[in-house]
Amino acid sequence: MSQQRQPFGIYTLANDVVYDQLIALLNSIDANVGSDIPICVIPFDQRLERCQQAIASRPNVTLFTDESAIARWEKFAQEFVRVHPEAQRTQQKHPRWYGGGLHRKFVAFEGIFDKFVFFDGDSLAMKPLTNVWQQLETYDFVFDDWEHAKSAPHTALDISLIEQTGLFTAVDIRPKLHCSSFWGSKYGIFGAEELAVLQDRLVNQGEAAWVNGQGWWDDAFLFNYMTLRCDRPLFNFTLSQNGQDRTGNCANVDPFTNVDNVLYNEQGLKPIHRIHYMGYASSDFARLAKGEDADIPYKDIFLHYRFLQEPEQKPTRLKPPSPAAKIQRFVRKAAQKLIK
């Protein structure tokens, strides 16, 4: 598939570490969104051998290859981190928290799709994106999450600090809060000139502090600053006047009902855009794909999509981890905590 411009498409972010999740996501898009919709995989880093093999076998999937765009967005994020007050205080203590890879998803604004939807790699698509494309006729950003409902200490932006500037009120800010695991937007937003203005405000005018210090390393927190400051129209399905639009999406929080391997919001059986396995390690999914009974909700759904095109390789029975494996993982986690 050539890198010519497309009217719409899907992006995700991946490397070989999340290979099993990438295959499951691609298969879920194929089954529930459309078998011919263009998909572009943004490289998290250079570990891509298995991903490239998977992409080569799928005519509608390409790899994002514009290294200059990747470098631009990594630099933008790194400059933000360099001046953020909390990052300056804790970056040396927690160097693993920031590597820049997550912020690569913003290259979607410079990609090959005029309109696009981004799916985090730890997600599975559950329905067509027709209503997202429709909303993008009116809005520049489309989200589907409940970040706006979080209590003030846990929001992506420091609402009280921003209110002190007189530029925005809490009423302005609250409905614009969002995550970065699923979102729709358009090519050309945050072009070079606009990005330079944002960087100047972050670096030279002290607005980096608008981003809550609890998440200075999180791409979603910086993204919230970007969407608020650019002041473009934004739509969130969880704030829709249509109750059918308001659903859950998190595997570890929201209850779903399985109907023929498609999940629906348990209350009202409302269709959901995706299930998001937020907070579960990629290593857990790799072990699950090898037949180990990992502690992941809706694991049957994940296995269904992971092996949708290779049903003969799907584990027929899940085995519990061995005592030795449990001890080894416990020791590894303890060591990682000591490093932090």
Image (cartoon, rainbow, N blue to C red):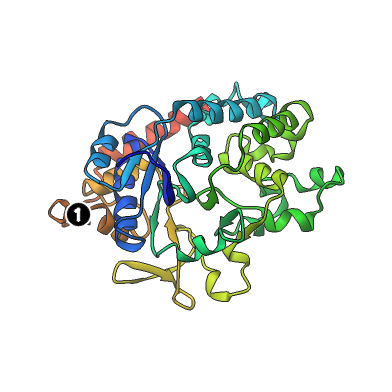
Name the residue furthest front.
Answer: 4
Name the residue furthest bottom.
Answer: 268
**Residue 150 horizontal side relative to residue 4, left or right:** right
**Residue 177 horizontal side relative to residue 71, left or right:** right
Q: 139 above or below 19?
A: below
Q: 91 above or below 13?
A: above
In the picture, residue 188 is in which quadrant?
A: top right
In percent of width and height, residue 104 lies at: 49, 35
Q: Nearer the viewer, residue 187 or 181?
A: 187
**Residue 286 horizontal side relative to residue 218, left or right:** left
What count of labels does the image hold? Answer: 1
Name the residue furthest left.
Answer: 312
**Quarter of the image with the N terminus in it:** top left
Q: Nearer the viewer, residue 205 or 276?
A: 205
Check disc 1 and report its element: helix, strand or loop.
Answer: loop
In percent of width and height, residue 25 lies at: 34, 51
Residue at horizontal 21 percent and vertical 51 percent from the top: 319
In percent of width and height, residue 109 lies at: 53, 41
Residue at horizontal 42 percent and vertical 52 percent from the top: 277
Name the residue furthest top.
Answer: 92
In percent of width and height, residue 237 lies at: 57, 64
Q: Find disc 1 in the rendering and name its residue.
A: 309
Mark 1 is surrounded, within 10 Å at the Cα level, by few (under 14), some (14 to 19) or many (20 or more) other residues, namely few
Q: Nearer the viewer, residue 249 or 132?
A: 132
Residue at horizontal 56 percent and vertical 39 percent from the top: 219
**Residue 194 horizontal side relative to residue 164, left or right:** left
Q: Amino acid at mark 1?
A: Gln
